[in-house]
Amino acid sequence: MRYDRYKLLKVKIDRGVAFVSIDNPPMNLLNMALIGEFSSLARKVARDENVRVIVFQSADPDFFLAHFDVEGLVILPDEPPPKPTQLTGMHPVCEAYRTMSKISIAKLEGVCRGGGSEFVLGLDMRFGAIGKCILGQPEINVGIIPGGGGTIRLPRLMGRSRAIEAVVGGGDFPAELAERYGYINRALPPDELTPFVEELAYQIASFPTKTIEIAKKSVLAGVELPLKEALLEESYLFGV
């Protein structure tokens, strides 16, 4: 498959790993064009038998994804719309990566706030560089709440109380604090981050595609299903 037609994403495939560099200056703002490319990429890699792991990184040393482009907020209606009956906006994109059979990883070496934070929360794993990685959901500072899944995904990672702190506090979470709270998997020294993520990605990609798929499916069942149903699903998948 060809991955050279994206304008904001630079994709390199190597040994079963798709390395995706986000390049949307200035500051890697999360706008509709970038969301569109994330969506297109999800559809493409889901069908690509040569890709088993996706690593997202940034072409900007200071920003992974700054936040959602605030100019897009002007399209919000004056009156609240009816409660939606299907997912729209960022939600289908994040769910595509969360539920696909591939493993997705964020390598965080800069600021990742707001919609950027919500995007990486939809990925399978997050690793951050100490002294460089900063995450946060600052939406409350402008009178809104996270609208791309932040209030839903954070409590599932860090628990109710810490998630409320993150959402209504609106503050930053440096890598070490983010690791302690469960926001990211690990905080690593900057010079160790890339070698660690690459070694992990290549190791995962070396395993059978089917095994990766059913392992992720079983873990998702453990999060989504009641305990007995999840254990039955694991028993079934063990024999697939």
Image: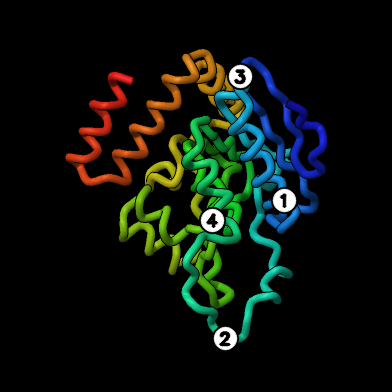
Identify which amino acid the numbered label 2 is placed on. Glu
Left or right position of 26 against 89: right
Identify which amino acid the numbered label 3 is placed on. Gly
Q: Earlier in the sequence, mark 2 or mark 4?
A: 2
Left or right position of 240 against 231: right
Image location of residue 79, percent across then percent down: 57, 86
Q: Earlier in the sequence, mark 1 or mark 3?
A: 3
Q: Which residue is mark 3?
A: 16
Label 2 Cα crowd, 10 Å radius (few <14 / some 14-19 / many 20+): few
Closest to the camera, between mark 4 and mark 1, is 4
Image location of residue 99, percent across then percent down: 47, 40
Q: What is the C-alpha distance between the residues marked 2 and 4? A: 22 Å
| Residue beneath the point at 65% across and 50% down | 65
User: Contact (CB < 8 A) between labels 3 and 4?
Assistant: no
Q: Earlier in the sequence, mark 2 or mark 3?
A: 3
Label 1 Cα crowd, 10 Å radius (few <14 / some 14-19 / many 20+): some
User: What colour scheme does the image use?
Assistant: rainbow
Q: What is the C-alpha distance between the residues marked 1 and 3? A: 24 Å
Q: Which residue is mark 1?
A: 34
Above/below status of 72 relative to 216: below
Dot 2 falls on a residue whose secondary structure is: loop
Q: What is the C-alpha distance between the residues marked 2 and 1? A: 27 Å
| Residue beneath the point at 49% across and 31% down | 101
Q: Which residue is mark 4?
A: 91
Q: Earlier in the sequence, mark 2 or mark 1?
A: 1
Who is closer to the viewer here, 180 or 7? 7
Left or right position of 171 against 220: right
Dot 3 falls on a residue whose secondary structure is: loop
Question: Disc count in the image?
Answer: 4
Q: Which mark is residue 79?
A: 2
Q: What is the C-alpha distance between the residues marked 3 and 4? A: 26 Å
Label 4 Cα crowd, 10 Å radius (few <14 / some 14-19 / many 20+): some
